[in-house]
Image (tube, grey):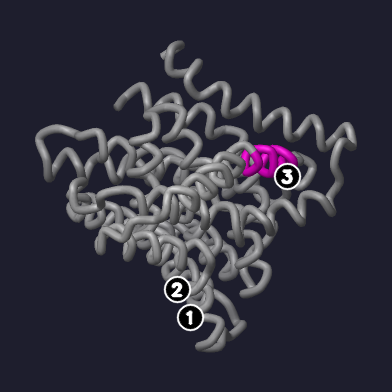
Amino acid sequence: MFEVLLIVLPIFIVLATGNILYRLKFFDQHFMNVSNKLIFYFLLPVLLFYKIANSNIKSFSLSYLLIIMASTIFIMFFISFITGNLFGFKKSSIGTFAMNSFRANYAYMGLPVCYYAFGDKGLTIASILMAFIVPVVNLMSVISLIMTSDKKMSLKNFIKNTLFNPLAIACISGIFFSLLSIKIPNFLNKSLELMSNVTLPLALFSIGATLDFKKVKGSFKIIFLNVIYKLFLLPLIALVLLKITSPSTTFSSNILVIMLSSPAATVNYILASEMGGDKDLASSVIILSSALSIFSFVFWISIL
């Protein structure tokens, strides 16, 4: 377990450094807003496109994992709604609780961990899995909030949030290039590689800067349960499905479990705010799950 901790620790040192530098005023909120915009709308799409377009998707045979992944998310969706109703959560909290339970920070946290724990091949597989997981979790997140919110979402915004965000477009474009074996000119490929190298460290700095435990508000029992669901129950469901359907786990299935053990996505707060969800619950779970994910990553990597 100690060896696994040493693998994961550099990621959290970078994350903590981002938090410290932010508190020491090396950069301010305006810089963070610009950085987040740069990461989400440009750098992450570049990284995903670069990794997927330069991979041979056909060689990975991931269709089985995609079914497991989708099944895991659907099961978690139903468990979360059942939990919310059994424990009498307020209506706006149930949809947010469900979204927090299955929508993870796959890009900002999952990708770095897969890269530093499993190498470049791990990052490539994680990127391909993201190509399919992003539309699914986007769709399920919007459905979760629509079911428990009095606010209505237009068809235009529904399509925008589920299919046409930058990450989904980059993933779909990368799959198109990979399946058709379209070769990217070497000079352009090198440029994409250079820009991709900026993405993961800057993303970790960004996550670190947002960790402010003073913003944790609401019922600690609900928050803690939500964190447990996200960091441990969701990957456990995937692992159980993998064990039931296959005698042994593979390198690719390990990547899937680690991706699912990532903390709650920062975009959950934005969606909860825009669609009448519980934004305090979203914010609190994002902060605590991000801080505690060092334990979940070490736990799951050790088991796998």
- Please, what secondary structure does the residue beneath circle 3 have? helix
At 89% from the left edge and 37% from the top edge, which residue is drawn?
A: 25
- Please, what secondary structure does the residue beneath circle 1 have? helix
- Please, what secondary structure does the residue beneath circle 2 have? loop
Q: Where is residue 295 drawn, in percent x and y? A: 50, 27
For the residue pair 279 and 5, the one nearer the viewer reads as 5
**Label 2 crowd bin: few (<14), some (14–19), many (20+), radius 10 Å:** some
For the residue pair 252 and 49, the one nearer the viewer reads as 49
Tell me where residue 137 sits by quadrant: bottom left
Residue contact between numbered discs 2 and 1, judged by CB atoms under 8 Å:
yes
User: Where does the N terminus fall, quadrant-wise?
Assistant: top left
Considering the whole magenta stretch, tell me its main secondary structure. helix
For label 1, the residue is 159
For label 3, the residue is 210
Q: Where is residue 206 drawn, in percent x and y? A: 69, 44
Q: Which residues are magenta?
A: 202-211
Among the two numbered marks 2 and 3 on one chain, the one whose residue lies closer to the N terminus: 2
At 22% from the left edge and 57% from the top edge, which residue is drawn?
A: 67
